[in-house]
Amino acid sequence: MAVAQAHVARVDSEEEVQAFMANLMQDAKIRRAAHNMLAYRFTTASGTLHADCDDDGESAAGTRLLHLLTVAGVEGVAVCVTRWFGGVLLGPSRFALISNCARQLLEAEGLMTKGGKRGKRK
C-alpha cells in the first residue's frame, strides 16, 4: 500500500473545494487514512484570491502544501494528500514525502512544471 497519495481538482469556489473533499471522503480507504491534508488557491471573477489549508491533525502539513502552491504560482486548484500510517514514524521527513507527492501530481497534470513553475492552465 502507498504511504501517501495526492489528489487534485480544479476549483473556483469554496463550494467546489468542499465538493472535492466530500467526493474523496466517499472512498472508505481515503476516509480511514490517518490524515487528509488539504490546500487550495483560486481567484474569483472579482479578483479576490482565496487560499487556505487544513492539516487534518498532521501539524503544519497543510501549511506546507499551501506554500508549495504559492511559490509555484499554482491557482485554481485544490490538492489533498492522503497519508496512511505504515507502522514507522517518519519524523520530519514526512513533510518532504507529502510535498513531493503533491508536486509529482501537479507536474503530471501540467499544473506545475519541473522546478516549481506554473504550467499551462487547461
Image (cartoon, rainbow, N blue to C red):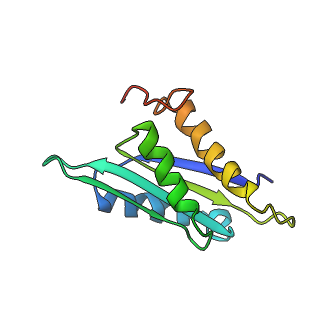
Q: Residue at x 36, y 42 (%)?
A: 75
Name the quarter where the N terminus is drawn. bottom right
Left/right of residue 24 with respect to residue 17 in the rendered view: right
Q: Position of residue 39 (x, y in %)?
A: 46, 56
For the question of whether residue 100 can be seen, the reply is yes
Q: Is residue 58 above or below residue 116?
A: below
Left/right of residue 81 with respect to residue 113 in the rendered view: right
Q: Is residue 42 above or below residue 54?
A: above
In this orientation, which residue lies closer to the viewer: 75 or 116?
A: 116
Name the quarter where the C terminus is drawn. top left
Q: Position of residue 17 (x, y in %)?
A: 38, 58
- Furthest-bottom residue in view? 57
Q: Position of residue 67 (x, y in %)?
A: 48, 50
- Furthest-right residue in view? 88
In this orientation, which residue lies closer to the viewer: 94 or 17?
A: 94
For the question of whether residue 79 can be seen, the reply is no
Q: Position of residue 29 (x, y in %)?
A: 68, 64
- Furthest-left residue in view? 46
Q: Residue at x 43, y 27 (%)?
A: 119
Q: Residue at x 47, y 53 (%)?
A: 66
* Residue 53, image quadrant: bottom left
